[in-house]
Image (tube, rainbow, N blue to C red):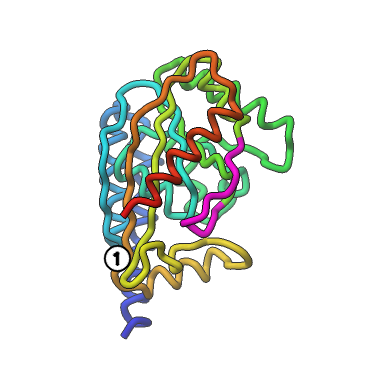
Amino acid sequence: MRSLLAVVRLLRLIGHLFYGVGLIRWRFGSLSLARRHVLIKRWSGKMLRILGVSLESSGTPRPGAKLILANHVSWLDIAAVHAVMPEARFVSKADVRDWPVVGLLVDGVGTLFIERTNKRDALRVVHQMADALKEGDTVAVFPEGTTGPGPELLPFHGNLLQAAIATEAPIQPVVLRWFEPGQRFSTTAQFIGTTSLIQSLWAILRARGLGVRVDVLTAMETAHADRRALAEHVREEISQRMAQP
């Protein structure tokens, strides 16, 4: 039965992905930014529902320019955040742009791409982020730099936080917690180790009761902050919220 459910979900997902590509290619260019955000939120929420993922959220995002910092568990984290904060422009590793169909989608919603193996590329992306923040955009990064198991956070890298500090844009910490029956921190949602995208997708397609909670924490000021100290402070805030029942 689970395999049959997975196949049904997969067929619906394929249709939804190509619908998203069509929106970006033929409609986004003529739409206002506000209307794009409506469609991004609607599309992301439906993607989660197709996959059988329930969405819970708390907190109110700060309006205007801000830098979102979130923990990273799954390749679906971007969809989870967009279902709550569709204005977010993510910084993502460059190879995601080459993923079939998904690459077109993330590129089309204004994602900034970074070559994580190239230290010099981080400076270029910081300048791009600063320009976006000056224009009033919301930028989002996963400061762990890669996906982690969930309950235990990886170290937070502070380099990209310099964009917020330089522009005095606030930081909005966001907590992502994937869960499923019997597991406060879902193992099905984990995208770590040698797990391939196909393996992760199939596990999610077969899952029952999978859900994600998106908690938007209080925004923090960044003026004159030290980026490393700020990164560690945000990590502690996110860690404390994850430890709460």
- List the single residue furthest toward the bottom: 1
- Identify the residue at horizontal 48%, vertical 15% (top origin): 168
Task: Specify whether 117 is left or right of 4.
Answer: right
Decide: few, some or many residues near mark 1? Use Cα within 10 Å; few <14, some 14-19, many ≥20: many
Magenta stretch bounds: 147-157
Do we see residue 28 in this rendering?
yes
- Identify the residue at horizontal 62%, vertical 64% (top origin): 193
Q: In this view, does 158 lie above or below 150?
A: above
- Identify the residue at horizontal 45%, vertical 67% (top origin): 187
Identify the residue position indicated by label 1 in the image. 52
- Identify the residue at horizontal 35%, vertical 42% (top origin): 82
Residue 200 drawn in magenta: no
x and y, in percent, of residue 44 in the image: 32, 49
Q: In this view, does 244 lie above or below 134?
A: below
Classify mark 1: helix, strand or loop. loop
**Quadrant of the rendered structure where residue 23 is?**
top left
x and y, in percent, of residue 39 in the image: 28, 40
Secondary structure character of the magenta stretch overall: loop
x and y, in percent, of residue 143 in the image: 55, 39
Closer to the camera in the image, 229 or 4: 229
Do we see residue 12 in this rendering?
no
x and y, in percent, of residue 35 in the image: 26, 32
